[in-house]
Amino acid sequence: MAIQKKIPMRKCVATNEMFPKKEMIRVVRSKEGDVSVDPTGKKSGRGAYLSKSIEAVEAAKKKNSLGNQLEVTIPPTIYEDLIVLIEREKLK
């Protein structure tokens, strides 16, 4: 009998929808307060997940849901990096 492996799920901070962890992008705030995009999902620090859609990034920017979740001001370059990462993945 084959055992089905449990798929870890995460909630998108912008849309409040649940997706498998591998289909999400993680944004991390380090202990020093630096915010960065974590495509590997393994950096240490407080993380927040966004679904891989430009609409989710725009919604997160409009509602400041990433900033609220990570308890820090998010620089505009983070949103630009997220959009570039999403577009790069669509080309694959």
Image (tube, rainbow, N blue to C red):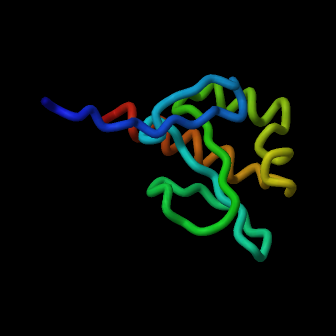
Q: Residue, x 49% and y 62% (percent of image)?
A: 42
Q: Residue, x 62% and y 23% (percent of image)?
A: 17
Left or right: residue 68 versus residue 43 is right
Residue 30 in the image: x percent, y percent?
Answer: 70, 69
Quadrant in which the N terminus appears = top left
Closer to the camera, 43 or 55?
43
- Outermost residue on the left side: it is 1
Residue 55 in the image: x percent, y percent?
Answer: 64, 23
Residue 82 in the image: x percent, y percent?
Answer: 59, 44
Quadrant in which the C terminus appears = top left
Q: Residue, x 51% and y 38% (percent of image)?
A: 24
Instruction: Please tell me whether residue 67 is drawn above or below residue 18 in the rendered image.
Output: below
Instruction: Please tell me whether residue 83 is drawn above or below residue 16 in the rendered image.
Output: below
Quarter of the image where one finds residue 75: bottom right
In this figure, what is the number of numbered marks? Answer: 0
Closer to the camera, 42 or 33?
42
Q: Residue, x 74% and y 27% (percent of image)?
A: 59
Left or right: residue 26 versus residue 30 is left
Instruction: Please tell me whether residue 87 is drawn above or below residue 17 in the rendered image.
Output: below
- Outermost residue on the bottom side: it is 32
Left or right: residue 82 versus residue 92 is right
Closer to the camera, 18 or 34?
18
